[in-house]
Amino acid sequence: MDLKTHRRPPNRLREAYRPKADAPVSFANLPRPFLDVGRAQRIVQADDGTFQIWACPNDAVRVTGSDPWLDDPHTSRVTDENGTKRYKLAAKSFDHRFQHHVLFGAVDESNTIERPRILDLVDYRCVRLCALGTDQGKTKGYREAMFVAARSEGLFQLDPPKPDDRPARLLASALATIHAGSKVLRSALATLYRDTNDLNNAERSRIRAAEPTYYDAVGHASVQLVFDLLNESENAPEEQQRFDRLIAAEVRQAFNLAETALIRPLHAARAEHQLQAGIHFKLKGESMSKGFNPPQLARQVFAVLCEITERATPDDRARLRTMFLPEPPLSFWKMMATVPQEQIDDEDSLEIWKIVLRALGYVRHSSASLGRTLADQDFPENRMDRLLTASGSSLLGLVDEALRWLVSHSVEAADLSILVTFGIADALGDGEARDWARKQMAVDYVRSADAREREKKSSQSPQMQEAS
């Protein structure tokens, strides 16, 4: 590429780096760094078929009355029924839509956006997108984004984008998936914010930040993903799956930011369930149970309870039913032989084991969800909320209350390990295990409670119709 340099340097700094010739100089031969003011440029095809970049005089707009930047190779253009003009940031937001349109072009019913033609000439290793925001003649600020843009030859072309143009097609897929993700997030937030008029200002600000956080994160990541896909062979189904996975991860992250503003576990669990359903059905390929893999403590406690249940004789269970917690019988300590010593030495952890093993004399340990079992036995929602938010000594009493509820309703089997995990994690300061147990119980509870409520309404509707 050649750069026309028939111009006088404005200062001594410019003079130090000015080429020592008045004839055109190869860009590769320019001393570094070469400082230049903003000048519109043109792509010029030489006699040998190569392309060159030539600078325009700065006074072109005063002489010709035209926009010298319209045909600049670094400028994106938009064409509609009124003609062609520069696609500028101006008063628009520097968001994912603007970035996608500038870098990859777009074709729709109202207009066509052409990407900068310089992208079609050089295999850049990176692309820096720069834009200046303006509104009614006032500068709103400078925006910039950097992307890795390694790509294969032949994917771009100098012609305006067409509907079958791969960059434009990937742009359409990216924007459609981002829009689907925003609908999933908005639906979950609507469930999360229901009846939350008593939130303080700090919580409200965190809630309002959820959607902008999603768009800020997904903008750069989705543009970079398009560049990455352009460097690979075309595979439409796999490309869509990668868009789905990216958007699902950003939706979850934005939702988690808003969820931490709430202390109502069941309220958050309903929104979590809504989020999982939306991701599963609108961002295909995502698992409904993703993010609920049990931590090590939960797996350990489940295995210990399974072994205790298997070895417990009818006499052992009878002794557990009549156990006096301050002075447990010998059979209790025999069962505790499989429990890690750390949990035996900790006073609060040991109390949790005493309470749960006493209930084991009535309720057999199994894989049946505890949250679902409590909901099926009409365990009050306000008590469930108190259990899930309790900590320290108050948690011991609420765990005992939940187990007594199961016993009084003649429940034969349930997963008792999740209560043990919840209590021990609280006692030992294992936040990850505690959050997992709390969320698992809450989600299972609201799924069952809401399903029963829907069944109840559907069974009542025919009767109400007959009465009317």
Image (spheres, rainbow, N blue to C red):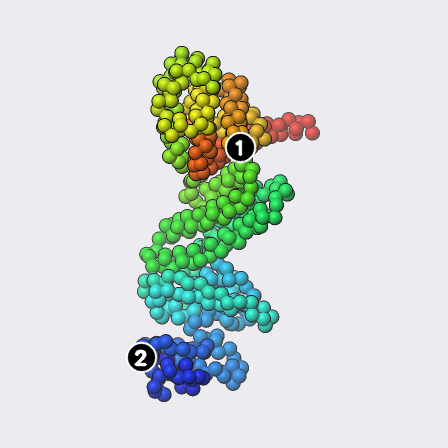
- Location of residue 391 in the rendering, given as x and y in whole percent from the top left corner: 51, 33
> Where is residue 132 shown, x and y percent of the image?
51, 69
**Image height of 188 relative to 72, above or below:** above
Mark 2: give few (<14), some (14-19) or many (20+) Cα within 10 Å: few
Q: Which residue is mark 2?
A: 29
Q: Specify the amino acid type for callout 1.
A: Ala
Instruction: Please say whether residue 169 is visible from this viewpoint.
Output: no
Q: Which residue bears the numbered disc 1?
A: 390
Q: Earlier in the sequence, mark 1 or mark 2?
A: 2
Q: Position of residue 309 (x, y in %)?
A: 38, 20
Viewer-nearest residue: 268 or 14: 14
* Label 2 residue SS: helix
Q: CA distance from mark 1 to mark 2?
A: 72 Å
Is residue 464 placed above or below 133 in the rendered structure?
above
Quadrant of the snapshot with the N terminus: bottom left
The residue positioned 61% from the left and 48% from the top of the image is 201
Q: In the displayed image of the protein, which residue is found farthest to the top?
A: 315
- Image label count: 2
**Residue 110: image x %, image y %?**
53, 63
Residue depicted at 51% across the width and 72% down the height: 85
Depicted 454 relative to depicted 124: above or below: above
> Does any portion of residue 341 appear in the rendered image?
yes
Question: Quick check: 392 left or right of 54?
Answer: right
Amino acid type for the residue under numbered disc 2:
Asn
Local crowd size for mark 1, using a 10 Å CA cut-off: few (<14), some (14–19), many (≥20):
some
Q: Quadrant of residue 30?
A: bottom left
Q: Secondary structure at mark 1?
A: loop
Point out which mark residue 357 bears. none
